[in-house]
Image (spheres, rainbow, N blue to C red):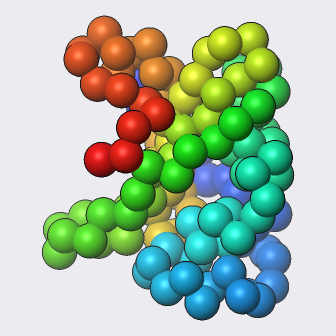
Amino acid sequence: MWSRVVLFTALAAAGAGAAEAAGSGNPTHDRLIALPPAEQAKTLAKNVGHGCVGTSAFAMGVVDTTKWKSLAYWSVQCKDGRSFAIQIAPNAQTSVVDCRVLQANGKECFKKF
């Protein structure tokens, strides 16, 4: 199930810098995309919780439709083999789902939408 949490405080509190130059309309996504891959995985895993130690992260994309504008989607692979999909709203609010739930419904976590 999706659980709502307000996280990514380190990213939200970080300075604007070059990351916002990406201009996705989602400041948290822009800051995250500017991090090195290992830091992306570490940051996402920390915010997912559930004992996840991130080994890789994948930016699946940012929605550009009017209704869902600037929702960013990421996935993170954990050291123990689990993976999670994360929806990041422009206000840094996140929703997290275990990829096993998506896979049971014929969806994939590590593919671009």
* Residue 9 appears in view: no
Task: Please tell me whether residue 45 is drawn above or below residue 31 in the rendered image.
Answer: above
Residue 10, located in which quarter of the rendered image?
bottom right
Is 24 drawn above or below residue 75 in the view shown? below
**Along the line of sight, which residue is nearer the eye, 19 or 66?**
19
Q: Which picture quadrant has residue 16? A: bottom right
Q: How many marks?
A: 0
> 88 or 20, which is in the foreground?
20
Left/right of residue 60 with respect to residue 11 in the rendered view: left
Q: Can the viewer see residue 101?
A: yes
- In the rendered structure, the answer to whether residue 113 lies left or right of residue 10 reads left
Q: Is residue 39 left or right of residue 34?
A: right
Q: Position of residue 88 (x, y in %)?
A: 50, 56
Rendered residue at 35%/15% (across/down): 103
In the displayed structure, 79 sits above or below 88; it is above
Q: Could you tell me residue 42's position as x and y percent?
A: 80, 42
User: Which residue is at 39% across, 38% downward?
Assistant: 111
Quarter of the figure with residue 13: bottom right
Residue 109 horizontal/vertical position (percent): 43, 30
- In this rendering, the answer to whether 62 lies above or below 48 is below
Q: Position of residue 21 (x, y in %)?
A: 60, 90
- Quadrant of the drawing holding the N terminus: top left
